[in-house]
């Protein structure tokens, strides 16, 4: 149960900050006190990895003390509903059309108030496909915060597991990219199809092969997924000085 206060604290702070934007929704707790992956609905193939989102929520519950609902909740970007979730998954296969001005403004507001987006190129694209569309749109949302490489020393690599890379179904790019708002990574972006490595079929089999590292790579993809969820819930608490001796001792 140790992680629950972090979850509840983050949701309380976010809700308090956004009360003027959410008339009539101030008492919306209950299931919302649990971690629920929310999925951005855009004009392209946004729903290719819903099973992966459900699976990483299940893994988060199994491996940590965070309470979850292992679902994948579709959300429209122009809706106030996105403010109920600390974690938004923005994935896709192939290009997608430009976001509307209302979607851009609402997503900017969500990120500014403390929300977190995990973007994931399900097609593993680089310079075309989902990659080109996402880079175009996130530059509209956060024009002053370009995507930059996330160093292996970033707190996301130690929020739960101690890691130094972020593989997915693929290993096209060893590093995550991020849009920073101050010291906070409001957006993290993988071109390795993280959710493709997490996804299972209804029969329980993994849906996709993992390349080039096979099952050990899949396990690392699950671990970075859990770290990303924990980062969305807890932000930089693991960077507090009190944790450093323990972390350094584990790395020896």
Image (cartoon, helix red, strand yellow):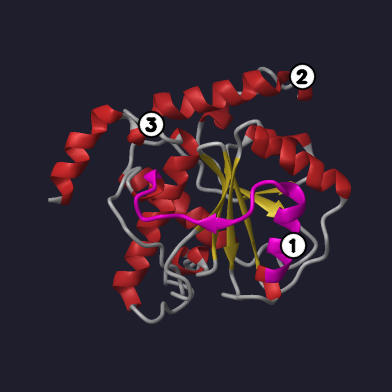
Is residue 78 visible to the viewer in this orientation of the structure?
no
Q: Nearer the viewer, residue 240 or 61?
A: 240
Q: Which residue is mark 3?
A: 237
Which dot, 3 or 1, sits closer to the camera? Answer: 1
* Mark earlier in primary sequence (1, 2): 2
Callout 1 environment at 10 Å: few (<14), some (14 to 19), or many (20+)? few
> What range of the chain is rendered magenta?
132-155
Residue 225 picture location, percent across and down: 43, 54
Q: Nearer the viewer, residue 193 or 147?
A: 147
Which numbered marker is on residue 136? 1
| Labels 3 and 2 touching (C-beta < 8 A) | no
Secondary structure of residue under mark 2: helix
Residue 136 shown in magenta? yes
Q: Which residue is mark 2?
A: 20
* Mark earlier in primary sequence (3, 1): 1
| Cα distance in 3D space between marks 1 and 2 | 30 Å
Marker count (numbered) = 3
Residue at the outermost right position:
101
| Labels 3 and 1 touching (C-beta < 8 A) | no
Residue 179 picture location, percent across and down: 59, 49
Q: Nearer the viewer, residue 225 or 164?
A: 164
Residue at the outermost front position:
144
Which numbered marker is on residue 217? none
Q: Is residue 236 above or below residue 47?
A: above
Q: To which quarter of the image does residue 245 belong?
A: top left
Secondary structure of residue under mark 1: helix
In the picture provided, is 122 more to the left or to the right than 242?
right
Which dot, 1 or 2, sits closer to the camera? Answer: 1
Which dot, 3 or 2, sits closer to the camera? Answer: 3
Callout 2 environment at 10 Å: few (<14), some (14 to 19), or many (20+)? few
């Amino acid at each position: 149960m140790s992680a629950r206060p972090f979850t509840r604290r983050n949701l309380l702070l976010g809700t308090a900050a956004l009360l003027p934007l959410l008339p009539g929704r101030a008492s919306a707790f209950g299931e919302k006190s649990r971690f629920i992956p929310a999925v951005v609905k855009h004009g392209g193939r946004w729903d290719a990895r819903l099973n992966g989102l459900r699976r990483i929520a299940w893994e988060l519950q199994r491996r940590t003390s965070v309470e979850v609902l292992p679902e994948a909740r579709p959300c429209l970007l122009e809706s106030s509903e996105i403010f109920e979730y600390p974690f938004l998954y923005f994935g896709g296969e192939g290009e997608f059309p430009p976001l509307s001005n209302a979607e851009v403004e609402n997503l900017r507001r969500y990120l500014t108030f403390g929300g977190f987006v995990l973007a994931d190129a399900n097609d593993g694209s680089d310079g075309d496909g989902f990659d080109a569309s996402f880079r175009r749109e996130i530059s509209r949302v956060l024009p002053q915060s370009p995507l930059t490489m996330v160093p292996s020393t970033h707190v996301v690599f130690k929020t739960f597991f101690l890691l130094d890379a972020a593989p997915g179904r693929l290993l096209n790019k060893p590093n995550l990219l991020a849009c920073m708002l101050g010291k906070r990574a409001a957006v993290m972006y993988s071109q390795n199809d993280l959710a493709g490595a997490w996804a299972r079929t209804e029969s329980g089999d993994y849906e996709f092969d993992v390349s080039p590292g096979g099952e050990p790579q899949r396990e690392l993809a699950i671990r970075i997924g859990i770290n990303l969820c924990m980062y969305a819930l807890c932000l930089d608490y693991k960077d507090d000085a009190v944790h450093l001796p323990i972390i350094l001792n584990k790395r020896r």
